[in-house]
Image (cartoon, rainbow, N blue to C red):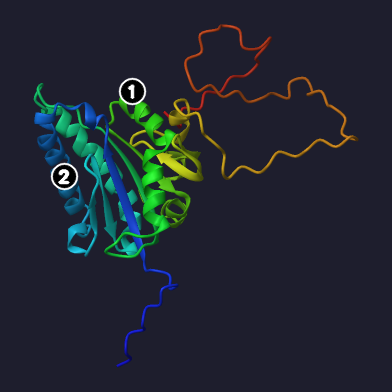
Amino acid sequence: MDAPLHAEPLDVPAELALVAIDMEKYSQIPEAKMAAARCDVDDIVATVLAECELPDPQELPGGYKDNGDGAILLFPPSVLARLVDPLLGRLNGALVRYEQQRLASSPVLRLRASVHVGPLSLPDHRGDAINDTTRLLDSRATRQALSAAKDSGGFLAAALSEIAYRRTVHAGRTPDLGSHHFLGVAARVSDKPGFEQPCRIHVPGLTGPAVRLYLTDATSPTAAPASVPQPSDAPTTPAPGSGGTFQFHGQVSDSTIADRIETLRIDRRQR
């Protein structure tokens, strides 16, 4: 049997999958009710993890980091896809059920979440992976996406790092979630001016285009760059009857959209 390799200071730590959660407006909850609200969140998360047959992060040394109004949970990287699907949808569903049974004196529980994967040393949690996970959680885009969740009757908004998205959704490992359930954004944090990373926003029950209305940092990560017109390019006039495509992401109240529309086809696939 070979002896284990001796870890050197410059060795790359083993990869871990990370999920961070944060309670909305936790600091506004009366102090006497903070512990109970946080306990309810912990119970909901533990129940959903068990439903998804995911390992208990607290069984991994340093696998659970309490942040007061939230936590960072660490998992083996092999379960990364399940941290996206079914975890996010089931977590939102559990929060919906909680709301239906919530006492009027108890606070509403809404969560932001982020999912990432990367090298991280334990038990000291040193590494960029945990910093990036936290910043995705705190990004302006994730906070704005929670407003989309509220308006649609949901209680969760999540951000996936680009690497987590590509290893799970893009790779076809999320049977109930496709690319149209996510929106590409530039994750920025107001008090971290040097941080900007591409990520994917997900609000359970909504498509990416439906969430776009709420975000100021939406991008098109997979779109090809627009071609730059050359001096020899002459402007062209569309041929009569050539048609066009109009996309409306909200209610249209103006009765006049164009001078003349010969054929109108309504695509409801994103409803």
Secondary structure under tag 1 reads helix
Percent from the top left, x then y, of residue 75? 28, 60
- In this rendering, is residue 246 above or below 222? above
Percent from the top left, x then y, of residue 66? 22, 49
Q: Is residue 65 left or right of residue 233?
A: left
Secondary structure under tag 2 reads helix
Percent from the top left, x then y, of residue 198? 51, 45
Q: Tell me the residue that label 1 is attached to.
A: 151
Q: Amino acid at mark 1?
A: Asp
Q: Tell me the residue that label 2 is attached to.
A: 42
Query: Which residue is drawn at the image coordinates 23% and 30% (left, top)?
Result: 27
The C terminus appears in which quarter of the rendering? top left
User: Which residue ends up furthest to the right in the rendered image?
Assistant: 232
Query: Which residue is drawn at the image coordinates 65% and 16% (left, top)?
Result: 262
Q: Is residue 235 left or right of residue 143?
A: right
Residue 173 visible within the image:
no
